[in-house]
Image (cartoon, rainbow, N blue to C red):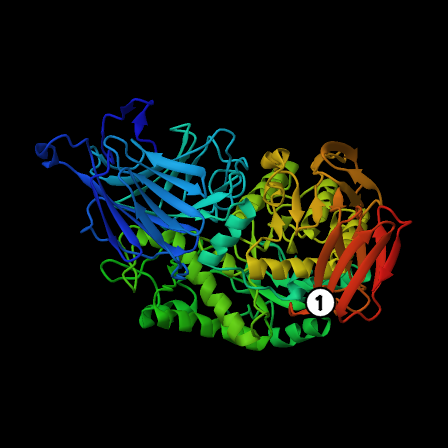
Amino acid sequence: MKFTDGYWSMKKEMSPLFAVEYADSRVQGSELTIYAPGKHISNRGDCLNLGMLTIRLSSPMEDVIKVSIVHFEGTAYKGPFAQVAETNPAVSIEETEDFIVYQTGKTKAVVDKRPNSWGIRFLSGDRELTSTGFRNMANIKNNATGKTYTVEALAIDVDEYIYGLGERFTPFVKNGQTVEMWNEDGGTASEIAYKNIPFYITNKGYGVLLDNEGDASYEIASEKVERIQFSVEGERLDYYFINGETPKGTIQKYTQLTGKPALPPAWSFGLWLTTSFTTNYDEETTSSFIQGMADRDIPLHVFHFDCYWMEAYEWCNFTWDPKTFPDPKAMLQRYHDRGLKICVWINPYIGQKSPLFREGMKGGYLVKKANGVVWQTDMWQAGMGLVDFTNPQAVKWYQDKLKTLLDMGVDCFKTDFGERIPVKDIAYFDGSDPVKMHNYYTFLYNQAVFELLERERGEGEAVLFARSATVGGQMFPAHWGGDCSASYLSMAETLRSGLSLACGGFGFWSHDISGFENTAPADIYKRWCQFGLLSSHSRLHGSTSYRVPWLFDEEACDVLRKFVKLKSSLMPYLYRQAVISHEEGTPMMRPMFVEFSEDRTCETLDKQYMMGDSLLVAPVFKESGEVEYYVPQGTWYNILTGETVKGGQWHKDTFDYFSMPLLARPNSILAVGSHEERPDYDFADGVTLNLVCFEEGARAETIVTDVKGKAVLWVKVRREGRRILVHTEGQNQNLTCKVLGEEELEVVIE
């Protein structure tokens, strides 16, 4: 939201109360409270008839400083609020004549006490990261509407870029954009987003989390080109300044604060095939797809039933349509016997025709209006209501319905929607603020389903396919990018969105291979298969047409087969990266600047990414097969073509459908498994350690896990002269080593 008319003036309807200078402070335990009046105080009379902002600094975790800005503290300040960890860190507060220094770890907030010199500078050691000052921190009243807003504007440095703020399809670098935090179903070709995360990071290595689940607004080098401004309606604004020193360190620190991703089961990394959305299907249809994949030697691991596994108008009744699936339990058993896992589509809406509507209404399990009647709409499902997940009994009721499906043989759920949440005249069971619940609802929805899966299937076996999210949603993987179209433009915007989401700690992410809307030409289908199988999770899904490869052309079958098998063979490496995401919070798929924060060229790259710490992926976005991509320093190795690639420069090459830029990082160990048919196998048995372009004196180490993520093989490698020395501990039967890039080197296994 914009409040000014140019640099000098406020809009005529806006009345600001700026923090102008320091007046006083108090220390209570580890909390510092600062009082900042709205004008310079030159005499006692200036203290009268004057507004003042109260600013509190506290720390929930080392190197994290919470800033709370309050105008009228007596105003109701209702949740929900994002869950954050509290670790009681050591805090020091030192005061001089001119400054107060609030410090946790290496991170400082320096408050300026001098007259007419209001400001807080945020530092890492002695390096200033950002600051707030005069005409930045404010409470602003709109006299035309009577609404008030609390505003903060932090400095953006020369050459500083802003990233993140959720899964955004707009340009990857957010400078110059206005961003609204409001979950909506808008497809992938607009500024609307399914996953709004009020957290951003910058290439200077810090991040800021706005602690407000409402409709926050960001002006990023837009209204004030030297500032990133964020505002919320009301008398209070809270944010966390997070200093991980590097972009990767800050993402890790953020997930330490708001929750790390659970570890998805290894089987979920295989290929998912769906019925698509509005297509006609029954068991004969789905079985023909499954058999067709087997006949063409394309490994398939998860089969998904989309909306119409339930009867029309009854979404959700959680009952198989008896006309289409007369014996679903037997069908699911037949599919399990073929080695498949089963996913079914659900959402949190209960159509009035569903038998569950009256049950939910009678039990008080549906969201109500302020007058106590059930809220309903005809949008999506006729007369539908909405499950109130703030009611513990409603959560249990919903979970019990899903448990029946699990007992029948369903393995996981696609938790669709969660964005169309009403805010006007709404009363939640727990009294939550409806505006803040609009975005937070999806957290409760996905949490309810994920916790059921963990309880019924066991920890490490739970996985979702979720569309909407907010802060903390990364704990319930995986997520997919929503309704994209069958074009290269949409494929590129999909990748941008995944990179933006990764900046918010979402470790596991997918997308609809070849696009959801329309039907792709064979060319795009094959290129998207490459991209899709080099994402953490891989799903073929569409809207009005099926996505089995033989409907495109026979070569599509060959391309899909190659990349499904490639991904399965890479699982010893990929699942280790999944464990790192789970334990450290670093996403599997990460922007180039996160992995190479010292390489300035990487700061704006949005058409390539790192899959884990050792594989560079550059999807092809042109029918010609031409791709231009940047390679950081060192000698890299294309594992598809067998060619070395010189780093520190751009490359422009042309690739057929069976190759692309898939580069292994120099001085790395790429563990490749002995199986191509499944993603869940004994990763250490027969593993090949690919030693990539080791330079003289280089060292590296890695771990191979089992399918539960437990380390079973430890590997350390170093190069000395013409020899590469490999030391292993643990499960190393049938282990082999292979040198990539300089094959005449001798390998010695110690």
Instruction: Residue type at mark 1: give it.
Output: Asp
Q: Position of residue 742 (x, y in %)?
A: 87, 46
Q: Position of residue 216 (x, y in %)?
A: 36, 43
Picture residue at 70% right of the left edge, 52% below the top: 533
Q: Is residue 385 above or below residue 115?
A: below
Placement of the C terminus among the 4 image quadrants: bottom right
Picture residue at 72% right of the left edge, 58% below the top: 701
- Crowding around mark 1 (Cα neighbors within 10 Å: few <14, some 14 to 19, many 20+) is many
Image position of 342 (left or right of 258): right
Picture residue at 65% right of the left edge, 44% below the top: 609
**Closest to the observer: 311 or 688?**
688
Image position of 391 (left or right of 598): left
Q: How many numbered marks are there?
A: 1
Q: Position of residue 352 (x, y in %)?
A: 39, 63
The residue that mark 1 highlights is 680
Residue 350 appears in the rendering: no
